[in-house]
Amino acid sequence: MKLFRSLDNLPDSSRRGAVTIGNFDGVHRGHARIVERLVAKARQFGGPAVVFTFDPHPVRLLRPDKAPPPLTWTDRKADLLAELGIDALIACPTDFQFLQQSAREFFDRVIRDALQARAVVEGANFFFGRDRSGNVQRLREYCAEAGMALEVVEPVVLDGEVVSSSRIRTLVAQGHVEAARRLLTQPYRIRGRVVRGAGRGRQLGFPTANLDRVGTLLPAEGIYAGRVPLDGAVLPAAISLGPNPTFGEGALKVEVHLLDYTGWLYDRELEVDFLARLRDIQRYESVEQLLRQMDRDIAAARQWAVQAA
């Protein structure tokens, strides 16, 4: 799979195939159904399966106060979509000029001219162009005029509700990472840079990697079981997300204790999967009580990691 960050100078190998357009935030099961049909259409027409997305999300430019925190970053999105079988992801830089294109202009310039699409695959609630003026019906008309095939994919419904990025965002924000996992194609993941903390975890025998610069949505405060892909291995982890009331600390921190790891992590980027929420953040009357609970948390985290392997 190839990742492009511009429509300029696209190779022929990424044109004249099947195209889908959207934000694909989180890459959930609804997205997976669209990509499944996209790949089938691409094979039918003998061309590539291409996903066109926006970087950043248009809402971050048009209504920044309303912009939800993202669930994925671009490289992660590319990896998840590659696992689903696409041939190319175009993460197009979004600016105000680009967003001023009418629905007709967007179709002509992007879908017809730049991508030279032979087929388009979209969800039923697809909108495009300035002020979201283009909908599926208008897309159907444009595709018919251009001689392109169009397939409209119905949403995935789970437990009586449509699978959507907004639904997943609500679950993650509430700490329900297991429920979110059922809607996603992979466990919910964050990424941050390891910075120096107070060093208290190492003093207690539980060294932690303190994450900073996390650009995606953080789950609710709590203790979590997780896992960390690192240096070709996948390590179980216990994650503390929140303050440390036992030591009188009120600042929110993301602390990751990697089981079975003793290496140096400072200044490295770390990616962390959230598998399950184990408990609330609590204040303990003594360090000994805290250590006993941490032993239980680590045992539970190890068990979750084994189940998820």
Image (cartoon, grey):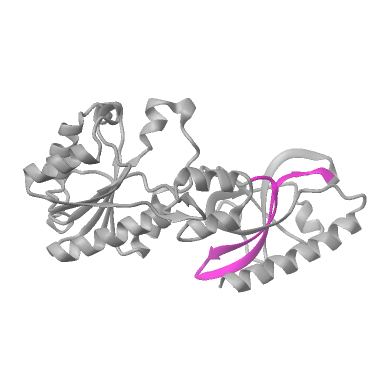
Residue at x 28%, y 42% (from the top left corner): 92
Residue at x 67%, y 67% (from the top left corner): 262
Q: Quadrant of the C terminus?
A: bottom right
> Residue 240, how many percent across, how many down?
70, 52
Q: Is residue 49 magenta?
A: no
> Residue 299, how many percent across, how many down?
74, 69
Q: Quadrant of the N terminus?
A: bottom left
Residue at x 37%, y 58% (from the top left corner): 32
Give residue 157's quadrant in the image.
Answer: bottom left
Relative placement, left or right, of 186 versus 238 is: left
In the rendered view, tell whether residue 50 sits above or below residue 99.
below
Give residue 265's quadrant in the image.
Answer: bottom right
Residue at x 16%, y 48% (from the top left corner): 115
Q: Which residues are magenta?
A: 220-245
Relative placement, left or right, of 159 versus 7 is: right
Question: Which residue is most to the front?
Answer: 160
> Residue 190, how many percent across, how many down?
54, 51
Q: Nearer the viewer, residue 77 or 179?
A: 179
Q: Main secondary structure of the magenta part?
A: strand
Answer whether residue 160 is visible to the viewer in this image: yes
Relative placement, left or right, of 241 versus 179 is: right
Q: Nearer the viewer, residue 193 or 72?
A: 72
Q: How many marks?
A: 0
Q: Is residue 237 magenta?
A: yes
> Residue 203, how many percent across, how many down?
81, 57
Answer whether residue 260 is visible to the viewer in this image: no
Q: Nearer the viewer, residue 2 or 51?
A: 51
